[in-house]
Image (tube, rainbow, N blue to C red):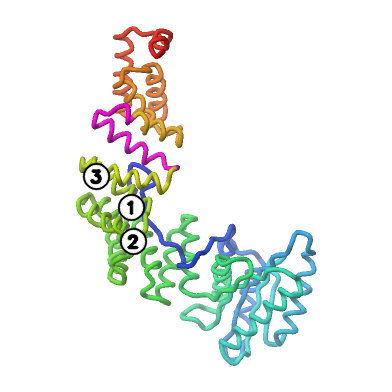
Amino acid sequence: MTFKFSSKEIHFLKTDSDDFKIKPPKTYFGDLLLDKSDKLFTFERRITKTKIPGKKFLCAVIQISLTPDSILEASEDTFKEVFNSSLDHKKGIWENLSQNFFALAFWGYKNKKKASQLIVSLKDKLSKRLKADILIGFSTFPFHDFSKSQTLGNAIKAADHAAFFGPNSMAPFDATTLNISGDRLYQLDKLEMAMEDYQKGLEIEPDNINLINSLGVCFGVMGKLNMAKLEFEKAMKINPDELTVIYNIGLLYQIEGDIDKAILYLQKAHGSKLSVFEVELLLGHLLIKKKHHEQAIPHLEKASRINPKSGLTFRMKGEIYLEENRPEKAGLEFNTAIKLNPGDAASLSGYAKSLELQGRNLNIALTLAKKSISLEPDNKKFKKRLKTIQTKINDTCLSPQKELKQQH
């Protein structure tokens, strides 16, 4: 099932993976799990086959951010020395996964606090010896129902979690890690795998609104609207003021054709302290459908202020002014939309219509109208506008030269 909107800019909203001021990494370690290398598979197998007393261990992955003039080969020797000096080599294993990316597992510690202290000590020693940033993601076993072999994958996902906070950070595997991992899989259009991570995250934190909303978004994108609504409503019970969830429920009602209910939810989202482009855009879009043009304009104006690079807001305003028989104002809006997106067929056709209604620049209008049809050959409205322009040119018998003189 696909959802048809006036633009791809209207879509389900997903929240950030965390509430802190963070930046996503340029590359994701978790992508390694989609196509495991031989070294990754080998270390995973080593963990599984190693007999670990007490059946508990900590697994970590470490990235050493070396400067361009550093010697990469030296990092492996240094890592080996630091590993052996920090940990009992009889109670741990490690593997160089790729250049400056390492995996390790160790056991025999008294408790999780002691294990954390050991991994922090290892981080500090590596950083000091190599004069480099050290990024670490780690996970412990046992943890919920994850297997020994999955612990390495969890640590790799935790490295992505750490990377959100910079190249010299460390993070444990937790529900937020799974939110980040799920979001990455969602970006890669691997919805089923993303849902697995969101659901696993909810086993750890059942009331995590980000995870609930993300799961609902996946159901919505897959066309499972009732299941999506159940998730969004679940999130609303936890926090009735969560803006992204309110918006998503409104969007669901819009998809189902209940525009009045959709507007009610979106107006609630609009009342939030935060200004969100999608909220203002969709509200404007729905108010246009209800012919409430005066109410729609302020929302579209606000949307264009939030995102000045969105041609859609200007196009929608142009369409309102066309319908209100204000062709000059419509032309200004369509012109801006075309500058932002030269391939916007609707704006090209709308601009052509605005010129035709003003009775000027008819040959330019003809060119614009023809271009809109070349982009959307089956659009009946565009064809009708083109025919009207051609008829007006024929009736007035204006050549391009005469029309040009008339303009001056």
Q: Secondary structure at mark 1?
A: helix
- Residue 213 on image: x %, y %: 36, 64
Residue 314 in magenta? yes
Q: Can you say whether 108 is above or below 43 in the image?
A: below
Please report contact status of discs 1 and 2: CB closer than 8 Å, yes or no: yes
Give the quarter of the image for residue 65.
bottom right
Q: Amino acid at mark 1?
A: Val
Residue 324 in magenta? yes
- Residue 205 on image: x %, y %: 40, 76
Q: Main secondary structure of the magenta part?
A: helix
Report the magenta residues as a range.
Answer: 309-330
- The residue identified by callout 1 is 279
Foreground disc of the pair 3, 2: 3
- The residue identified by callout 2 is 243
- The residue identified by callout 3 is 295
Q: Nearer the viewer, residue 225 or 134?
A: 134
Q: Can you say whether 67 is above or below 119 in the image?
A: above
Specify which label sits upstream in the sequence, 1 or 2.
Answer: 2
Residue found at x 21% / y 54%: 261
